[in-house]
């Protein structure tokens, strides 16, 4: 089976497994773990922020940021389909207390200003936070370029909002645009990034921002049960993952190869910005079933089917996928 369901299926490389086996560790709940500390400091440098904190998952990283920013009675804005809106079991609402207002999938500054509204009476919702996502998973791995990012952050500021960036795949955006990742984080209050998706670590995300935010984040992480004692064992894989950022360019090439090949066969397919290819169909279940029959794993995704290229899928694998798909009815 060629597994293109997600870039989260990537297995740790030999280099990662070796780094994990020999990682210096401490007790991160008591007084710190040297490998996690090194990872956090490396990520903070890459993102151009003061401080960072490792978390076991991206959902926990986002939950920590939203719990920090929001109180009950607050409103937050996020692009339609955002992971925090659709795929985190509503924790933004019932855990962090925010009522979500969806923006267009690709919001413009005017959308932010309109949805933030003005001052409201004491019984109205207080618009507090803009939560961006780059790349946008449900938007097909869509990239928000630096200029658009900056304009959205400025609009949020002028409406009195804070900004959190769900940057689970911001590495992909930086590689696709060929810009430093820090330029896609500029101006935000908090950012979460994932090590366990295209970068291939078995687990781990990082939430980052000011030193003041990160000291609050330590408490919030503990509250969520996310303090990991000898976390350096997995943190070591994260350090290796950061060495693999440039490799994402190959995943993007493979996604384009896949999309072009599917389109040539008549499939209604998106043009990928990064490593996610979406097929439009009103029968995602049967399409995924037929793909599985020929040894290709994809997932039903919103009103379609999603393929994700990643480091465990080679160019030759993508060519094999296209050969196998050639025998299938066009969705
Ligand atoms: C955009 C985005 N944010 C956050 C997450 C959550 O990451 P995790 O599965 O590590 O909780 C995901 C996972 O797919 C994601 O795609």
Image (cartoon, rainbow, N blue to C red):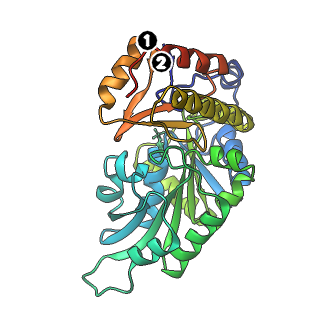
Q: Which residue lies furthest to the left in this view?
A: 123
> Which residue is tagged 1?
294
Residue situated in front as seen by the camera: 242 or 107: 107
Instruction: Give percent across and percent down for residue 120.
Output: 32, 85
Instruction: Give percent across and percent down for residue 265.
Output: 50, 25
> Which residue is tagged 2?
325
In the rendered view of the protein, which quadrant contains the C terminus?
Answer: top left
Q: How far apart are marks 2 and 1 (CA)?
A: 7 Å
Q: Residue 49 sits in which quadrant?
A: bottom right
Inspect this view and state whether residue 220 appears. no
Which numbered tag is attached to residue 220? none
Crowd class of label 2 (few under 14; some 14 to 19; many from 20; radius 10 Å): many
Q: Are marks 2 and 1 in contact (CB under 8 Å)?
A: yes
Q: Is residue 13 left or right of residue 193?
A: right
**Depicted 141 relative to depicted 153: above or below:** above
Instruction: Give percent across and percent down for residue 235.
Output: 63, 35
């Amino acid at each position: 089976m060629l597994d293109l369901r997600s870039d989260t299926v990537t297995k740790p490389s030999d280099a990662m497994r070796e780094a994990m086996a020999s990682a210096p560790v401490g007790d991160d709940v008591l007084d710190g773990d040297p490998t996690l500390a090194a990872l956090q400091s490396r990520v903070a440098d890459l993102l151009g922020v003061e401080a960072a904190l490792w978390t076991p998952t991206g959902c926990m990283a986002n939950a920590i940021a939203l719990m920090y920013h929001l109180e009950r009675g607050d409103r937050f804005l996020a692009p339609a389909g955002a992971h925090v809106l659709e795929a985190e079991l509503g924790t933004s609402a019932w855990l962090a207390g925010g009522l979500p207002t969806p923006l267009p999938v690709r919001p413009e500054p005017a959308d932010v200003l309109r949805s933030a509204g003005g001052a409201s009476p004491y019984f109205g919702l207080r618009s507090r936070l803009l939560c961006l996502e780059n790349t946008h998973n449900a938007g097909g791995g869509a990239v928000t370029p630096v200029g658009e990012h900056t304009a959205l952050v400025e609009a949020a500021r002028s409406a009195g909002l804070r900004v959190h960036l769900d940057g689970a795949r911001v590495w992909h955006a930086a590689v696709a645009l060929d810009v430093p990742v820090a330029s896609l984080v500029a101006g935000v209050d908090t950012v979460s990034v994932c090590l366990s998706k295209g970068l291939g670590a078995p687990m781990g995300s990082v939430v980052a921002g000011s030193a003041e935010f990160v000291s609050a984040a330590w408490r919030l992480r503990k509250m969520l049960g996310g303090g990991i004692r000898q976390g350096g064992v997995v943190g070591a894989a994260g350090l290796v993952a950061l060495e693999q950022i440039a490799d994402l360019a190959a995943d993007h090439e493979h996604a384009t190869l896949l999309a072009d090949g599917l389109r040539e066969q008549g499939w209604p397919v998106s043009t990928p910005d990064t490593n996610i290819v979406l097929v439009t169909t009103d029968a995602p279940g049967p399409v995924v079933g037929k793909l599985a029959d020929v040894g290709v794993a994809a997932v039903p995704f919103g009103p379609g089917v999603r393929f994700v290229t990643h480091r465990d899928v080679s160019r030759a694998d993508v060519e094999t996928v296209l050969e196998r798909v050639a025998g299938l009815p066009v969705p």
